[in-house]
Amino acid sequence: MHYQAINLNEKLSTFNDLWSPKVVAEINDYQFKLIKIAGDFMWHGHQGTDKVFIVLEGEMFIAFRDGQVKISKGEMFIVPGGADHKPFAEKECHIMLVEPRGVINTGGTESE
């Protein structure tokens, strides 16, 4: 077996597009995705599944219908399944998402 760590900064350097998650690893039925964001995303929800945001660089916010949370470098936040939310960042921010395989970034799943 070949053992090699995944260098997240190296993976992030291979793309520049925003709001387009890239799968870098999988464990069981979960995917680890890297994404670069800036500006606003759309309101959406993920029925039946939670979603983890881990900020690797910069800071981001997640708006909810009744408030918002700020997530800074080195912090993580779990969005509860079904909660309408809108991620945004004032400046470019690098994030790792952890979510079940098949979840698309506008809510729902690929099979819907």
Image (cartoon, rainbow, N blue to C red):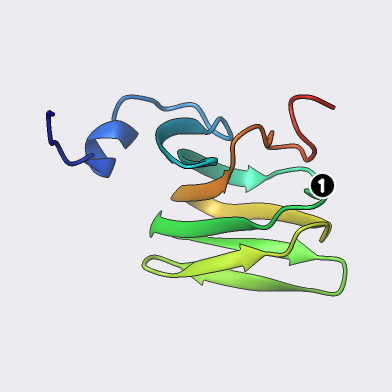
Residue 1 percent across, percent down from the top left: 13, 29
Quadrant of residue 20 within the rendered picture: top right
- Locate the C terminus and report the quarter of the image it occupies: top right
Q: Could you tell me which residue is drawn at 86 percent across and 74 percent down? A: 66
Residue 93 visible from this viewpoint: no
In the visual, does 107 lie left or right of 62?
right
Residue 7 percent across, percent down from the top left: 21, 40
Q: Which residue is mark 1?
A: 44
Query: In this rendering, is residue 92 above or below 69?
Result: above
Residue type at mark 1 is His
**39 and 70: which one is in front?**
70
Residue 33 visible from this viewpoint: yes
User: For numbered disc 1, what is the local secondary structure?
Assistant: loop
In the visual, does 28 lie left or right of 45?
left
Residue 68 percent across, percent down from the top left: 72, 72
Q: Could you tell me which residue is drawn at 23 percent across and 35 percent down? A: 10
